[in-house]
Image (tube, grey):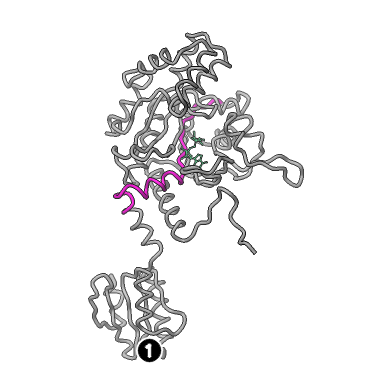
Amino acid sequence: MAAIQTVKGFRDFFPEACAKRNYIQSVWTSVARRYGFVEYETPVLENTELYKKKSGQEIVQQLFYFEDKAGREVAMRPEVTPGLARMITARQMGYKKPMKWFQMGSCFRYEEPQEGRSREFIQFNADIIGDGSGAADAELVGLAIDLMREFGFTEEDVVVRLSNRQIWVEYMERLGLDELQQSVLMQVVDKLERVKPEVSEARLKEIGLSLVELKLFMTEITAAHPVFAELRMNLEARGLWSFVKIDASIVRGLAYYTGCVFEVFDLKYDLRALAGGGRYDQLNALMSDGHVDLPSVGFGMGDVVVGLLLDRCADAKLKMDNAVTNALGCDVYVALADEGKRFEALKLIQQLRDDLRLKVEYSMQPLKLNKQFQMAEYLKAKWAIVVGSEYPELQVKKLSTRESRTVNLSEIAETLR
Ligand code: HAM
């Protein structure tokens, strides 16, 4: 019988993949905490309606949804922002503003699996609720940059492409475009880099514009535009502005963005976006029928593209590989040279695990000493301790240097320290 495969676009996590995932999550968590963010979580399963109302057409087309046993239409979360808005509007009174919240967990989108895109991915989200200033935008963009730096990526590896939807709103009002025409223009801008110029030209013609006119307007949007001033000054003061490039073609597919928008891209491998987000000042009001009107800004970062880039940038990979080796390996391998001393060895193992909090491995079955040493190498143990007939005298071997010495059981803690 053929083996049952994973569902298309879903992943098994073997221990190495788990260690890599945990490393990515530990970077996300530690940097977010450094920035003062606290963790929250929304459910994995939601009422489909939540996304139909709040996310926009593209996400709705990609929903994993089904009817539950009671006939309710439910969907696996494709993103967490609408769920967060629900939480905020329900309980925001209980929290001082601004609220700086982060979460991470699996999201699901029915996309065509390809490099950088799968149907299940882990997304980190950070959002600031209750601060409508450019300083809050800068805190978020700064966090995205510092996450990249913590992974070991530099300005040569990644860039934050930044724009502001407000610029487009004003431009479209000036042109007198109606809602439908506005959405055509935004779609053209969003896909400008990915589709042939003739295709964009044809769509622009429908709304009375030409590609030349559009590109001319876009070249006028530079870092000197007043809409970027506060954000820029805040990031310059931190020495992070060099990671940012103003790029008017960033408009973001999701429906709820109202101001600053940005995406993080790699510079060498042409991978899909590593992260994306922006300001969404009307979503909370929309969610609460106008009762809660809190400005918000946030972004999401997925594990898939981050993982691809980690494998390709040497310094970042070295950092990750060390963390993975550490996670998979052990500190001490206790080898038995004399089966008669198994229970003495177990007592020692228990003490090392309990008192010194070390990761300790040994063979649960009798095994030739050379096989036990092979296992110690395989597990990348830092130390091997040989328990033999001379017990309580022990052989302690540092495996990186092969240096070995005899110590008494009573000296073992001191020796390992
Ligand atoms: P998004 O741009 O749809 O934004 O997703 C953010 C990131 O999630 C992407 O840059 C990518 O790294 C990852 N991602 C998205 N779809 C996939 C996929 N199919 N496979 C692998 N990775 C994927 C949002 O989701 C917004 N809710 C972010 C946000 C938070 N805005 C405000 N607060």
Q: Farthest residue toward the right? A: 70
Front-most of 348 and 339?
Answer: 339
SS category of the residue bearing label 1: loop
Q: Which residue is mark 1?
A: 338
Residue 108 appears at what percent x and percent y? Answer: 57, 43
Quadrant of residue 155 within the rendered picture: top left
The residue positioned 38% from the left and 30% from the top of the image is 161
Coordinates of residue 313 in the picture (x, y in percent): 32, 47
Please check the rendered image and state whether residue 400 is part of the magenta-colored stretch, yes or no. no
For residue 73, side relative to residue 385 (left or right): right
Does the magenta-highlighted stretch encompass residue 304?
Answer: yes
Residue 119, picture quadrant: top right
Can residue 358 be seen at all in this image of the molecule? no
Image quadrant in which the C terminus is located: bottom left
When asked about the image quadrant of residue 110, the answer is top right
320 vs 202, left or right, is: left
Q: Residue at x 42, y 30 (%)?
A: 262
Q: Nearer the viewer, residue 210 or 292?
A: 210
**Mark 1 Cα shell of 10 Å, populated few (<14), some (14-19), many (≥20):** some
Horizontal and vertical percent position of residue 71? 76, 42
Q: Which residue is located at x 56 percent, y 33 percent?
A: 85
How many numbered tags mark residues here? 1
Asked whether residue 247 appears in the rendered view, the answer is yes
Q: Which residues are magenta?
A: 293-318
Does residue 306 sit above or below 13 in this rendering?
A: above
Q: Is mark 1 within 8 Å of ligand 1?
A: no
The amino acid type, in three-letter code, at marker 1 is Asp
Quarter that holds the N terminus: bottom right
Query: Which percent across, then down, holds residue 38?
Result: 46, 43
For the point 31% across and 54% down, the residue is 318
Position of residue 12 in the picture relative to residue 378 (left or right): right
Q: Is residue 262 above or below residue 317?
A: above
